[in-house]
Image: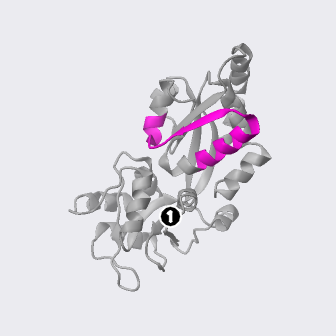
Amino acid sequence: MRRAWHVFAIALICTCAWMPTGHAREIRAGGTGSATELLRLLVAAFSQQTEVNTKVVPSLGTSGAIRALADGVLDLAVAGRPLKPEETGRGLVVAYTARTPFVIATSHPDPNGLSSADLAQAFRSHLSTWSDARPIRVILRPPSESDTALMGAMFPGLASAMQEARRRPGVPVAATDQDNTELAEQIAGSLIGSTLTQIALEKRNLRPVPIDGHMPTMDAFERGTYPYAKTLYFIVNVQPNPMVAEFIAFLQSPAGKAILRAANVL
């Protein structure tokens, strides 16, 4: 999907050609909270290289950022899911994709690994514990959140287990990606789904948990031995701010790829 840039490159070139030379050199970006710090890193490096003004709008989420892009409020959205038909119908396209390890994480200081069955059971029952008998405290995301669907598809039995957890009183629900990691830090023995890039860039006091013997490291992800990933979709309008074309090209440059890799993104 990251090669999707070539599909609409001609449209971007044409846009750049007819835009007046006095057009403001600015990019307004936002999207899924798991990519907020990554986006800040990328646009800061891009601004330094090109002198293009950039602004990252926080706390929009995937759907909010896509709507803002379609309405002309943003120039670039980073989504945690593919575009829906009605969104492509509004003239939006995926310009680039990147992948980061999706991890199960906890505040436990020394967590044991879990099997997929253990993970589902942790959401299904409030009696689940770590190997040292400390309680496992799960944190949910809203049903409409893209990570909810991702986790349910990724781990056998987890979708129904999360539905059961929603019926238990007292199970916290984190509205945003930042709420999710903040709550996980505050709750002893917490268990959440997140991304390696968010945890690392936000310097969260959380530890990824091995699942089915798969070690949640970037090296394992690159080797293909850690199979769980979240795709980040860089989305633009088919007639974007011409500076966005430069930014997408920057992502594919050696400098852009180096930033992505250092941030646990491929």
Q: Residues within 10 Å of mark 1 (few under 14, many from 20)?
A: some
Quadrant location, the N terminus: top right
State the residue lying farthest toward the bottom: 132
* 11 shown above or below 134: above
Is residue 84 visible in the rendered structure shown here?
A: no
| Residue occupying the point 66% across, 63% down | 224
Q: Is residue 90 visible?
A: yes
The secondary structure type at the circle numbered 1 is loop
| Three-letter amino acid code of the residue under disc 1 | Arg
Q: Residue furthest right?
A: 254
In the image, is residue 114 part of the stretch drawn in magenta? no
**In front here: 156 or 101?**
101
User: Closest to the observer: 163 or 133?
Assistant: 133
Q: Find residue 219 and report its horizontal and vertical position in percent.
A: 68, 67
Answer with the quarter of the image where residue 173 lies: bottom left
What residue is pinned by disc 1? 204
For image coordinates 70% across by 44% down, the residue present is: 45
Q: Main secondary structure of the magenta part?
A: helix
Displayed quadrant of residue 122: bottom left
Left or right side of 127 for 202: right
Magenta stretch in the rendered image: 38-65
- The x and y percentages for residue 118 are 40, 73
Residue 178's spot in the image, x, y percent?
A: 44, 54
Magenta stretch contains residue 51: yes
